[in-house]
Image (tube, rainbow, N blue to C red):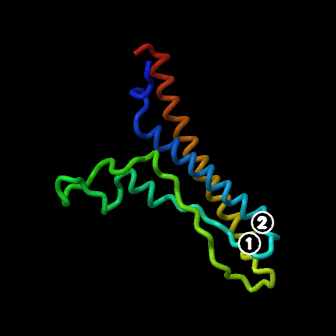
Amino acid sequence: MSLGGIFDRTVGVLSKVMDLRHRNQQVIASNLANIDTPGYAPSRLSFEKDLQQALGRSPLATTARHAGHFSVGAGDLQSVEGRIQRQAFNSGLGDQNSVDLDQEMVAQAENQIFYEAATQMLNKKLGLLKYVIQSDR
């Protein structure tokens, strides 16, 4: 029996967001691990715009039939992977390392908050499903 019909699109989106946030955490951790590495340029994972386009929330996402019709679900959610971008050297330090501890800690805290929010929303969705199953309706 397939469970695909039980879960709505929200569960898929939250799952993808959690995957991307986990990957973002790995990028931030790599930056922190290389804070003392000479010549290291920190990386950033960019995925928000790609995710919005996959959800059809971009004003550029229109249907194939008519340029004036906006698509509800344009793009493939599972194909969103994000892009890792290296930041340019912007520090005056002699070792050419441009990792800023404060900036990385803020990015880590922000990422953690968004991950926890997605986790709580997914738990609420699954809690509703559990309630429906237990109530024999």
Per the rendering, the mark at residue 34 is: 2
The quadrant of the rendering that contains the N terminus is top left
* Residue at 68% in and 69% down: 42
- Is the residue 101 above or below the residue 69 in the image? below
For residue 40, which numbered disc appears in the image? 1
Task: For label 2, count other residues whose C-alpha is less than 10 Å away and answer few (under 14), some (14-19) or many (20+).
Answer: some
**Left or right placement of residue 14 versus residue 55 in this view:** right
Work out whether residue 48 or residue 87 is closer to the camera in this orientation and state it: 87
Residue shown at 19%/60% (left/top)? 68
Secondary structure beneath label 2 = loop
Q: Earlier in the sequence, mark 2 or mark 1?
A: 2
Of residues 136 and 32, the one nearer the viewer is: 32
Residue 33 location, quadrant: bottom right
Q: Badge 1, how many Cα within 10 Å: few under 14, some, many 20+?
A: some
Q: Amino acid at mark 1?
A: Tyr
**Residue 17, numbered circle:** none
Residue 73 position in % (x across, y down):
33, 47
Q: Amino acid at mark 2?
A: Asn
Q: Are marks 2 and 1 in contact (CB under 8 Å)?
A: yes
Determine the secondary structure under disc 1. Answer: loop
Task: Say which quadrant the C terminus sits in.
Answer: top left
Inter-mark Cα distance, 2 to 1: 7 Å
Can you tell which quarter of the image residue 95 is in? bottom right
x, y percentage for residue 75? 36, 50
Position of residue 22 measured from the top left corner of the image (x, y, whole percent): 63, 49
Q: Is residue 86 left or right of residue 2?
A: right
Q: Residue at x 67, y 64 (%)?
A: 106
Residue in the picture at 49% in, 23% down: 131
